[in-house]
Image (cartoon, helix red, strand yellow):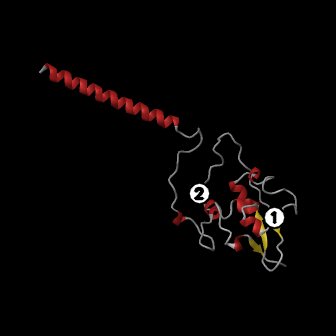
Amino acid sequence: MGTKWIHRTFFLTALLFFGLLVFYLSTAYTQQNAPPQGVPQKQQAIPLQILPKDNAGNVDWVKALSQGIIKPLESLDPDRPPTPVIDLDIVFKVKGELPDVVYPHYPHTQWLSCSNCHPKIFIMQAGANKVTMKKIEEGQFCGRCHGIVAFPLSNCTRCHSKPKR
């Protein structure tokens, strides 16, 4: 009878020890892999089906942002100051019959800081950027994002939106 009691005590002590060890290790892992202070925990993914679509059926990320369906982090660094949103449209005159291109800074600066594009992709001087569809399709200028992470280049009316006078 005495050895059964010793075995049970040993088994329960070992079980308690391993339970505490698992709890300690999981707590340490969670703290070590937690995002920096001020950065929210990982959110549930939003099903693409509920997001608004553009005229070609692609997700309209700008509309999803303005409707409050999504809220991207300003930065992974909680101490980084917020990026100013700039409401400025740049019009690129287009040769031929297509409407002119309007580049709206407002939706772009809701997502990105100015340094993402200036001066590496776009020189901040009127006429300094010789933008062509060929260069965009090759991944230059707007093609750095559009057709990759932003709406595809096949949706012409998203950019070619200003009728000629």
Residue 77 or residue 67, whichever sits in front: 77
Residue at (62% x, 73% y) in the render? 56
- Residue 86 appears left or right of 54: right
When the figure is inspected, residue 117 is found, relative to residue 53, above or below; the finding is above
The answer to which image quadrant residue 26 occupies is: top left
The amino acid type, in three-letter code, at marker 1 is: Ile
The CA span between labels 2 and 1 is 26 Å
Q: Which of marks 2 and 1 is in front?
A: 1
With 88 as the anchor, is 79 left or right in this view? left
The residue wearing badge 2 is 70
What residue is at 66 percent from the left and 48 percent from the top?
74
Look at the numbered disc 1 and give the secondary structure of its residue. strand
x, y percentage for residue 28? 47, 32
- Furthest toward the top, the residue is 2
Q: Is residue 21 left or right of residue 9?
A: right
- Toward which corner of the image does residue 7 lie, by quadrant? top left
Give, as a three-letter code, the residue at label 2.
Answer: Ile
Q: What element carries label 2?
A: loop
On the image, the x and y values in percent for residue 69 come to 57, 59
- The label shown at residue 90 is 1
